[in-house]
Image (tube, helix red, strand yellow):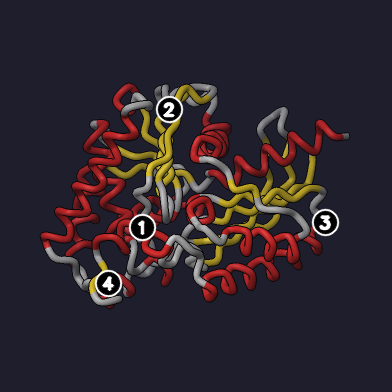
Amino acid sequence: MTRVAAVDCGTNSIRLLVADVDPATGQLVDLDRRMTIVRLGQGVDKTGRLAPEALERTFAACRDYAAIIKELGAERLRFVATSASRDASNRDDFVRGVLDILGVEPEVVTGDEEAELSFTGATRELTGRDDLARPYLVVDIGGGSTEFVVGDDAVRAGRSVNIGCVRMTERHLVRDGKVTDPPTPDQITAMRADIEAALDLAEETVPLREARTLVGLAGSVTTVSAIAQDLPAYDTEAIHHSRVSYDRVREITESLLRSTHAERAAIPSMHPGRVDVIGAGALVLLSIMERVGASEVVVSEHDILDGIAFKAAEEAEAGK
């Protein structure tokens, strides 16, 4: 097995996985997996630039991760950056900062590359399961964008569209610099229309309705699962491969969009960094389920981060 480190830097969070990986068998053994909410995409949708304070939060997390990677002795590090850094006019500042701290340049991947990595991470361990019909639709609801990938053993079609939970919150639920608490019916209607337009765009290239199993990734989806199970705290083992029905997703989404900041923050499994954006993220999930007619979503804790680790291990093996 090859010891690798993978970093996924998105719009809302930056995550690290150090793992021993065997690309041939699809085995991946976690050594360290963690997430830090840095909100790199703060204001990007409006200004087109990464804010200085957002960059510093991200660099601080990178310094912490550098120490962990060194301690565990990873043979190869791959750093992938997604939606926020794709869109920013000052992304060179971001690239230089990461290179200085971690010694590698972040790969600012395209939406299609992001979709393929997400699919690999989410589905490699599902191969051979008789209870999950194929093709899969893998949906990765991030902070700035959502990736849609349909495939069996390999990707058939993928598309990234700009309807992440942070972007939707900032675009529709912020007034006078503050998140409306709770949002108004008009705000929800406008957000829903934006999501539906993005789903139309995704469906131009991805056959969403052909999927037989919906696999949901990332924090909005895993938080909905935690709420559905009424977990006393966030529990990765309970969440991974859990199934949440459409009716339960609808109930949770409606409740989140009616609730105040204090009520959402009081949910035991809620990460503080998701309190303001979870309503938008849940609405994206609900809208997708309605579009494809999914009766349930299979929730995966393995996603683009695991896909990055598999690719890093494959590159390391090829270079030996």
Left-right relation of 93 to 104: left
The residue identified by callout 2 is 150
What residue type is disc 2 on?
A: Val
What residue type is disc 4 on?
A: Val
Quadrant in the picture for the C terminus: top right
Q: Secondary structure at mark 2?
A: strand
- The answer to the question of whether label 2 and label 4 lie on touching residues, with beta carbons closer than 8 A, is no
2 or 4: tag closer to the N-terminus: 2
* Figure disc tally: 4
The residue identified by callout 3 is 73
Which residue is located at x 58 percent, y 52 percent? 81
**Closer to viewer: mark 3 or mark 2:** 2
Find residue 185 and report its horizontal and vertical position in percent: 11, 61
Nearest the viewer among 76 and 101 is 101
Which residue is located at x 47 percent, y 47 percent? 240
Left-right relation of 191 to 112: left
3 or 1: tag closer to the N-terminus: 3
Mark 2 nearby-residue class (10 Å; few <14, some 14–19, many ≥20): many
What residue type is disc 3 on?
A: Gly
Q: Secondary structure at mark 1?
A: helix
The residue identified by callout 1 is 167
Q: CA distance from mark 2 to mark 4?
A: 34 Å
**Closer to viewer: mark 3 or mark 1:** 1
